[in-house]
Image (tube, helix red, strand yellow):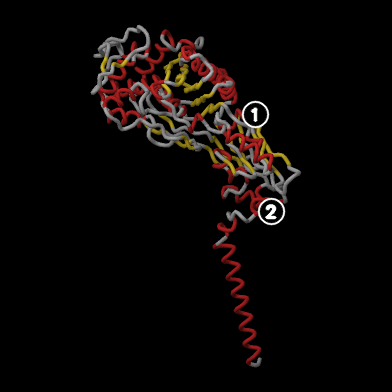
Amino acid sequence: MNKPLRRIAMFCGILVLALLVRTNYLQYVRADELNSNEHNRRVEIERYAHERGDIIVDGVPVTGSVETTDSDFRYKRVWKNGPMWAPVTGYSSQAFDSSQLENIEDGILTGNSDQLFFDRTLSMFTGEKKTGGNIVTTLNGAAQKAAFEGLGDKKGAVAAIDPQTGAVLALASTPSYDPSVFAGNSLKDSDARQKLLNDKDKPMLNRALRETYPPGSTFKVVTAAAALENGLYTDIDAKTDSPLPWRLPQSTNLLQNEGSIPCKDASLREALRWSCNTVFGKLSDDLGNDKMIEQADKFGFNEEIFTPVRADASVYPKDNRPQNAMAGIGQASNRTTPLQMAMVAAAIANDGKLMQPYMVAQRQAPNLDVIYTHEKEQLSRPLSGENAQKVQQMMETVVENGTGTNAQIDGVTVGGKTGTAQHGLNNSEKPYAWFISYARTDSGSPVAVAVVVEDGNANRDDISGGGLAAPIAKNVMTAVLDGKK
């Protein structure tokens, strides 16, 4: 071969080598970058080219997929009773991505997860149509329906947990929305989503996980737990050192009780039964801010909770003495999510053990093979078994013949605590109605519930945890108990 031909051959070889290097660089080094590039429409077309897997409740899908005719995205998401399940599933939109379980479990639902690599490889040889896997939830359909219908047209939220496992049984938030109305990528979908975002009632806000409220008197069970755990009192029927009236520390203001209830030197049991502000405010002050924070933290306060969907952190703040006294009765800067208060009730019902809340029981491959099963996990130990049982006795007295009688269930032991949380500057707005509770059977407690109601349409004097929230909690607990029969 003469010299010019050798040079041409070498040059061509270098070009081929450069092409191979470039190709491999694009395919392996920059693959993820190119796949996630917002201008790479092929990725999005492929994502919606097959049916999405389903989110399962009680063995039945609450989601589905339908073919579209007005887009190059072939399939879009639909929901069965979308407003009821949106607080659990979140949304999945061709134009606006996804949220909550639809987002966190997107790899399984689209079939693109590494956990499904074998299934994808096998389908290449079998010629089977690609579909997504399924997410099996812990949700109880009857309990979710009771929660959603119980809230009705009122603003509010419900969270229900299995205290023994941490399984989330219900997660309702109202007003809600139908994720189906903006699941596509048309102008109609965009307008529907914008209308929801502009709604002053915030239907897309998940109040069970992402809204924090003053917990009001429901927090008194945490203060009672702190008093027992720190040895301030050991006998729940012994008199406390609680003068009436009680002046807030470093202040001339007197802490008041509602009505003419017997709160002077009341025992812990009677103080919880009648929801004595003076007793629990003084307990919080006697314990001090650091010990109150320590107790609240054991119940899950001051940290985000993942179910795996994130719940905002509930807050028991570092504060001065007067504010700490008020925080001990669930006011001041004390703020919490309904999920957090369900966790408080669950820990007490479970003899002091707080289990990690979770919503995903299993992940399934497209052929329904189980590729993941959740194992229950203890999150913390907020109080001893002995002290948990003392708080149980106190909460059960509240339901038997205190402020929570509307939660009574025939033949079932129910513990609970009402709360009416002040709202607005100088309590100028209508208060929030709270109720936390658990139902207990011979085999332990299968359900703990927290309910908060923001009823702007009710008369102010008619707003109470026992009147508005307790009946909803009762119906949720009954739905779970009926399923155990």
For the point 51% across and 29% down, the residue is 207
Q: Is residue 310 above or below residue 215?
A: below
The amino acid type of the residue labelled 2 equals: Met
Picture coordinates of residue 374, whole percent (x, y): 51, 37
Residue 172's tag is none
Residue at the disc numbered 2 = 124
Is disc 2 in contact with disc 1, using a CB cutoff of under 8 Å? no
Q: Is residue 93 left or right of residue 279?
A: right
Q: Nearer the viewer, mark 2 or mark 1?
A: 1
- The mark total stands at 2
Q: Secondary structure at mark 1?
A: loop
User: Who is closer to the viewer here, 249 or 56?
Assistant: 249
Residue at the disc numbered 1 = 81
> Label 2 neighbourhood size at 10 Å, few (<14), some (14-19), many (20+)?
few
The amino acid type of the residue labelled 1 equals: Asn
Q: Secondary structure at mark 2?
A: helix
**Quadrant of image for the C terminus:** top right
Residue 103 picture quarter? top right
Q: Is residue 28 left or right of residue 296?
A: right
Picture coordinates of residue 29, whole percent (x, y): 54, 63
Q: Is residue 432 left or right of residue 112?
A: left
For the point 46% across and 17% down, the residue is 440
Residue 66 picture quarter? top right
